[in-house]
Image (cartoon, helix red, strand yellow):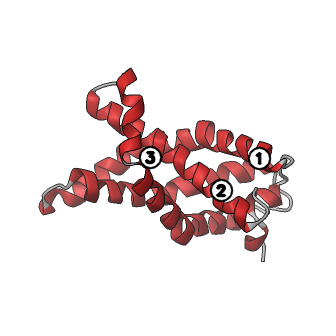
Amino acid sequence: MPTNRAQRIVFSILMAFAMVYGMELYNQALMAGGLATELFLTPFADIIPLMVAVIVLESLIGGKIAHHLTAKLLDPAKSPALLCTVFMGAFTCWSMCPMMSLVATIVFKQPPLGQFVATWLQTVAFNFPMALLWQLFVAGPAVRAVARVLYRLPVLTGGEAVGRKVQA
């Protein structure tokens, strides 16, 4: 959706914020036994380092995987923009959730070495459904709406949703 480097940077920061905030709030609610008003501020304690991790991992790995798989399964020039957007969001979550769950397991959970893999897999299992739904129905649409307002961008066609660089 962004058309130049500056727009891509702003879009990445906004998306990282939306995903980190939502997932941190979700995990805080899980640990507290449910969502409570006082939890809405707790994600801000760790938001900057987690956003950096998201941006780095998405730029280096997750985004490339999502673009590649979406372009492999869909013809971006002929596919509806909504379908391309859904595939990009789904594949981004599919690649990012295990990586960010690994970060959370190392930084926050710190299980004994013998329980590390089990703890990481459980973290992925708890987080993936929420990450996918949050991305497809809340964070993704909200960030794209903000980007359209900021950049006065039109709604995208299928090829633009996937990006020109993967069509080659």
Q: Are marks 1 and 3 in contact (CB under 8 Å)?
A: no
- The answer to which of 92 and 25 lies nearer the viewer is 25
Query: In screen coordinates, is 150 left or right of 131?
Result: right
Q: Give percent across and percent down for residue 153.
A: 84, 49
Mark 2 or mark 3: name the one nearer the start of the chain: 2
**Residue plotted at (33% across, 35% down):** 28
Callout 1 amino acid? Leu
Question: Which label number is shown at residue 128?
Answer: 3
Q: For the residues marked 2 and 3, what is the alpha-carbon distance in whole angstroms?
A: 25 Å
Instruction: Give the residue type at disc 2.
Output: Val
What residue did someone put label 1 on?
Answer: 150
Q: Tag 2 or tag 1, which sits nearer the N-term?
A: 2
Tag 3 secondary structure: helix
149 versus 69 height, above or below: above
Name the secondary structure under disc 1.
helix
Residue at mark 2: 10
Q: Which mark is residue 55?
A: none
Q: Residue 66: horizontal and vertical position, in percent?
A: 61, 62
Within 10 Å of disc 1 (Cα), the crowding (few <14, some 14-19, many 20+) is few
Q: CA distance from mark 1 to mark 3?
A: 30 Å
Callout 2: 10 Å neighbours few (<14), some, many (20+)? some
Residue 102 lies, with reference to residue 143, above or below; the image says below
What is the x, y in percent for residue 29? 34, 31
Disc 3: CA contacts within 10 A as few (<14), some (14-19) or many (>=20): some
